[in-house]
Image (tube, rainbow, N blue to C red):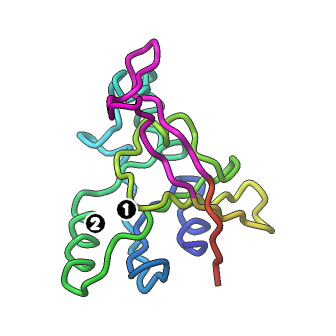
Amino acid sequence: MLLQARTEAPKECCGFLLGTGNVVAEVVPVRNVAEEPGFAVDGPELGIRDPELARDPTKVYRMDPTGQLKADRMAFERGWEIIAIYHSHPATRAYPSATDQALAHWFEPRYVIISLADDERPDVRAFRITERTDGNGTRIRNSDGQTVKDVTEEDIVVI
């Protein structure tokens, strides 16, 4: 992950961590296609009002669907699961941005963020991003109509 993050900087890199339980067996890099036609993360419903930001691979990632299918197929064939979705923040801290939170739609896997803000000491952190619900399971929405999400940091060990 670190090699990919450094190689692809200043663009955000992305990919999947596959394995079982909390043990990663395979890192699957996926191409960030945010700037390619037809793949931009656009839409106010996702909290991204700036069309330039939606296509800026230095600030947002969009996984190549082919890479997503490859990771999903690999996990299925090997009896693994997708443990985490990772991406890098080339210039900012390892914490889910508002855009990261808006685009988080998988609630079982962790979200791992690699910060290269200090290239000498990369910071790798894992988070759970979940939708906030009321006591009846109904999603809580903010004044813009977006689902409110909770971010919880998790302990991880990177070897």
Question: Mark 1 or 2, which is nearer the eye?
Answer: 2
Please state the horizontal and vertical placement of residue 58, each as a whole percent of the image: 54, 46
Q: Is residue 50 left or right of residue 59?
A: left
Region of the chain picked out in magenta, as a range: 127-152
Question: From this viewpoint, which residue is outermost toward the front?
Answer: 135
The crowding category of the residue bearing disc 2, from other C-alpha atoms within 10 Å (few below 14, some 14 to 19, many at least 20), is: some
**Residue beneath disc 2:** 67
Q: Residue drawn at (27%, 40%), measured in percent from left and top?
A: 37
Instruction: Indicate whether residue 156 is drawn in magenta.
Output: no
Instruction: Indicate whether residue 138 is drawn in magenta.
Output: yes
Residue 131: image quadrant is top left
Relative vertical location of residue 23 with respect to residue 104 in this rendering, above or below = below
Circles 1 and 2: CB atoms closer than 8 Å: yes
Residue 85: image quadrant is bottom left
> For this rendering, which residue is in front, 22 or 72?
22
Q: Residue drawn at (71%, 63%), measured in percent from left and top?
A: 123
Regarding mark 1 in the picture, which secondary structure is present there?
loop
Relative vertical location of residue 87 with respect to residue 26 in this rendering, above or below = above
Tell me the tag on residue 31.
1
Tell me the tag on residue 130.
none
Q: CA distance from mark 1 to mark 2?
A: 7 Å
| Mark before the other along the chain sequence, 1 or 2 | 1
